[in-house]
Amino acid sequence: MDEQTPIPTPETSPAPEATEKKGGRFASEVVEFIWETVKVVIISLVIILPIRYYLVQPFFVKGLSMYPTYHDKEYILVDKWTYRTSVPKRGDILLFKAPPDPTEYFIKRIIALPGERIVIKENTVTVFNAEFPSGFVLDEGGYLPESHITEGNLDVTLLEGEFFVMGDNRQHSSDSRAFGPVDRNLFSGMAWLRLWPFDRLDVLERFEYPPVIE
């Protein structure tokens, strides 16, 4: 009997139509994924941008000019809404564009208001205004340690829309004693919530000075 050589069976390959369908489905899924991602980004921007512009602004404290109220590298949220509906108050901790360089931001405390006269002399801050034409010594015991000395010797009368600001760490703060009053147009908002570090997380309430004793 003659030996028969087996006939090789050709390998089966996917039909061209099936390959095209699979490739088309993959491309469709990629396009759908990209579109869904774009929609998420757009919706996030629609929600976040108004909040970022009108309500709150994140801010990293840099340096020790506000110590011990705020420490270096603390992460806070700045309330941008309050000053749209009410006037800044003495004692507010303010975020504003730095007069020496408007591309940077400073954080300081409001010490004197528009129209007031402020005199700094011998570690004493005296404020003169319509209510107290003879002046009153500002009681800063609620936020200044006794060891913090207010250096300087100046006498400044603020114009309309001007505020006198100083850091709580008076001996290590570049503030209105150096660059002068800050115009209201430079204000960004008021310090509101400390988010980091967690062990110092808190809401900063607006400071209320004790009554003036004449």
Image (cartoon, rainbow, N blue to C red):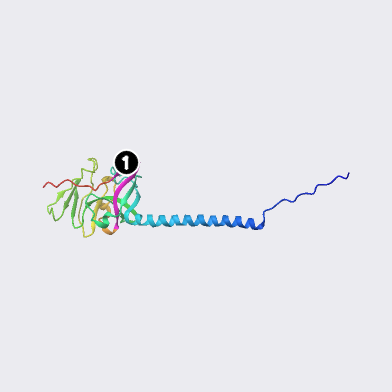
Is residue 201 one of those drawn in magenta? Answer: yes
Q: Neighbour class for label 1 at 10 Å: few (<14), some, many (≥20)?
A: few
Q: Nearer the viewer, residue 68 or 22?
A: 22
Is residue 183 in view?
A: no
Residue 204 rendering spot, x and y as whole percentages: 27, 46
Q: Can residue 56 be seen in this view?
A: yes
Q: Report the residue that reaches farthest toward the top.
A: 199
Residue at image point 35% right, 50% down: 58
Q: Is the magenta stretch mostly helix, strand or loop?
A: strand
Which residue carries the number 1 mark? Answer: 200
Instruction: Please tell me whether residue 14 belongs to the stretch shown in magenta.
Output: no
Quadrant in the picture for the N terminus: top right
Q: Is residue 90 above or below residue 197?
A: below
User: Residue reaching furthest front?
Assistant: 1
Task: Say what secondary structure mark 1 lies in.
Answer: helix
Left or right: where 15 falls relative to 45: right
